[in-house]
Each structure stands twice: as C-alpha cells, then as structure tokens.
Image (cartoon, rainbow, N blue to C red):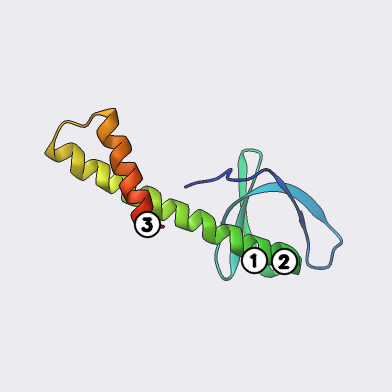
C-alpha cells in the first residue's frame, strides 16, 4: 500500500471540537484510514469536517491511481523478467512506456 505521498495533515472532527495529526493511507466512499505514528486507524468518513472529507476523497483517489500504476509496473516486470534478462536500461524503458500508457 502506498502511503506518505504528502506530509502529515491536521484532521478536524465534523463538529470542529477535536483535531489530530496523521497521514492519509486510503479513503473510499464511507471510510478513511489514517496513520498516526506506527498505528493505523480506520473510521467513518462522516466523522471528519467537510473540508477534510473532500480532501481525503481527492487524495485517496490519487493514492488508488498510484497503487494501480504500481500493480501494472510490477506485472510488467514479472512478464518481462520471465521472458528475458532484464537490465536497468530495459526496466527504465518499460517504466516510461507503462507510465505513459496509464496516464
């Protein structure tokens, strides 16, 4: 799972009474997962302020897209590795082609 794509963020509760620091790990339509130190917490998205909900959904989509690109690259690596000897130059070339194709 990709994390740490941004710096720690100050999250605010829906009623504005509480805040905490943490890194976004993932977000879907109903829940958000945040890393605080070495612990991860998953909770309902509705518990966050509207601004944090919006930000989490946008950044969560970026994380999901990056994870999907990584899966494509890993799959490509395995296919390539099985068919021929892979050099750093060939791997970089594959990465460039796959990244352009996924964008």
Tag 3–tag 1 contact (CB < 8 Å): no
Which of labels 3 and 1 is toward the front? 3
User: Which structural element holds mark 2?
Assistant: helix
Q: Residues within 10 Å of mark 1 (few under 14, many from 20)?
A: few
Tag 2–tag 1 contact (CB < 8 Å): yes
| Residue 70 image point, x, y percent | 39, 48
Q: 99 or 52: which is nearer to us?
A: 99
| Residue 16 image point, x, y percent | 85, 63
In this rendering, the answer to whether 16 lies above or below 94 is below
In this rendering, the answer to whether 74 lies above or below 47 is above
Please tell me the numbered disc located at residue 44.
Answer: 1
x 55%, y 65%: residue:
28
The answer for how far apart the CA atoms under marks 3 and 2 are is: 34 Å
| Residue 59 image point, x, y percent | 59, 57
Q: Residues within 10 Å of mark 2 (few under 14, many from 20)?
A: some
Circle 2 residue = 47
Q: Mark 3 or 2 closer to N-term?
A: 2
């Amino acid at each position: 799972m990709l994390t740490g794509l941004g710096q720690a963020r100050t999250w605010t509760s829906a009623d504005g009474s509480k805040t905490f620091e943490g890194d976004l790990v993932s977000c879907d339509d109903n829940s958000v997962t945040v890393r605080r130190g070495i612990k991860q917490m998953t909770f309902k998205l509705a518990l966050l302020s509207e601004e944090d909900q919006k930000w989490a959904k946008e950044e969560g989509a970026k994380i999901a897209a990056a994870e999907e690109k990584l899966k494509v690259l890993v799959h490509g690596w395995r296919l390539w590795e099985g068919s021929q000897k892979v050099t750093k130059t060939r791997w970089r070339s594959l990465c460039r082609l796959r990244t352009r194709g996924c964008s």
